[in-house]
Image (cartoon, coloured by chain):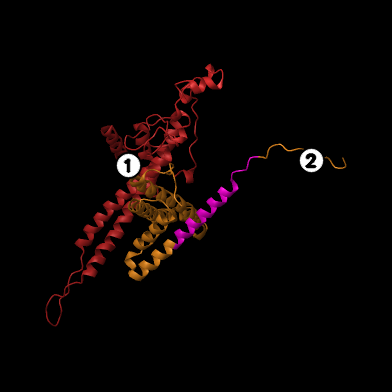
Chain colours: A red, B orange
Amino acid sequence: MSWIFGTPEKKETPQASSNKLGFDTNQISDISSILNSNTLDPTKLHPLAGLDKDIEYLDLDEEKLTSLEGADNGLLPSRGWTDDLCYGAGTVYVLGLGLGGLRGFNEGLKNLPQGRVDPVTNQVRPVPFKLKLNTVLNQITKFGPHMGNNAGVLAIMYNLIDASLDNFRNKHDDLNSLAAGFLSGALFRSSRGLKPMGYSAGAMTLVAAAWCGFKRVIN
Amino acid sequence: MSTPEADHSRDPCPIVILSDFGGAFSMGVIGGCVWHGIKGFRNSPYGERRIGAISAIKARAPVVGGNFGVWGGLFSFYDCSIKAVRKREDAWNAILAGFCVGGSLAIRGGPRHTFNSAVTCACVLAVFEGVGMMFQRYMAWANKPVAMPLPEQAAPAPLGA
């Protein structure tokens, strides 16, 4: 997502030239001493040439991984808060969409249209399949996006607040997660009065605690 | 047009779908906050403008985010699938993915509507890709390699000499 938020600031780490080139620049007297030395390794000449790699996969060195203390979640490498935001919101949104869709599927099956009794022949007219399918799909599209949107918005707020706290304190720990959960839960229901705010803040704190615990178990 | 190297600013394929879902959803929610905040503010009577903006944001911004998110995520999903099948990366991937997204999102409107949406979406994506390619050509032309300067020639004789 670097094209939206801009690439994170790259910090060059000064490397010893001997490390990079295979010889020490301080001990050079002329060209022939470089060319005749056995230490010269062409694969070390330029990292962009990629001569030392046989397969090109995800080269995260190009955009440095986050150097924030404790920011590694053990699941995915992260290049900073934008990665956390995108993956966090995306995962939670898709999960919410799926769970809500399942609930809608269930509701749709419960509320299937019943066949009417024909007043003339006194037999039950079967409901066409298309009508049943429509009912189920309507319920899925009613519950799925609703739950997905709410969960996704919560995840965005959590990640934004968490990233702000991380930047403010210069480290990431469980306390930041819990605080971010509390604040995002409170903000989510902030227009409904104090009591719903408290419930939502408590629930989000619990969710944040569960996420911290899950990370501990994974690592 | 094939790209010789992978694009390192994006993650590898199956996992990038989640990132695109989240990125598009966040973009939609944040943009929706601004858009519907202003709209709700302007459409409310005096004295209720702030609360009007807040309720408009609450009601509509997540929906905008959801629409964006589903579009972006589905596009990424189809893009990855098409890449996996075709084993190449070119502009047709995006166009085909756009066709599939347009069709999928309109699938409940009947075959005619589905097809029309799919073609519209594919055309939009084709325009995007075309503009992108033109831009790329232009940038490449602006940075074209410059010929080495000719070796030093005899300086032209000064006028009147």
List the residue tagged with mark 1: A204
Q: Amino acid at mark 1?
A: Met
Please, is residue A86 above or below residue A35 in the view? below
Q: Secondary structure at mark 2?
A: loop
Quarter in which the C terminus of chain B is drawn: top right
Residue B150 in view: yes
* Chain ID, mark 1: A
Query: Which quadrant holds residue A30?
Result: top right
Image x and y of residue B150, in percent? 67, 40
**Residue A126 screen position, x and y as percent:** 16, 73
Prevailing SS of the magenta stretch: helix
- Outermost residue toward the right? B160
Stretch in magenta: B123-148
**Residue A54 image position (x, y, % from top left):** 37, 36
Q: Residue furthest bottom?
A: A120
Identify the residue at horizontal 50%, vertical 42% (top origin): A6
In terms of image quadrants, where is residue B82? bottom left
10 Å crowding of disc 1: few (<14), some (14-19), many (20+): many
Dot 2 surroundings within 10 Å: few (below 14), some, or many (20 or more)?
A: few
Please tell me whether residue A149 belongs to the stretch shown in magenta.
Answer: no
Question: Is residue A106 left or right of B149 when viewed as pictured?
Answer: left
Q: Marks 1 and 2: same chain?
A: no
Measured Cα–Cα span from mark 1 to mark 2: 81 Å
Q: Residue at x 42, y 31 (%)?
A: A68
Which subunit holds the residue at mark 2? Answer: B
Image coords of residue B45 (percent x, y): 51, 60
Residue B156 marker: 2
Q: Amino acid at mark 2?
A: Pro
Q: Secondary structure at mark 1?
A: helix
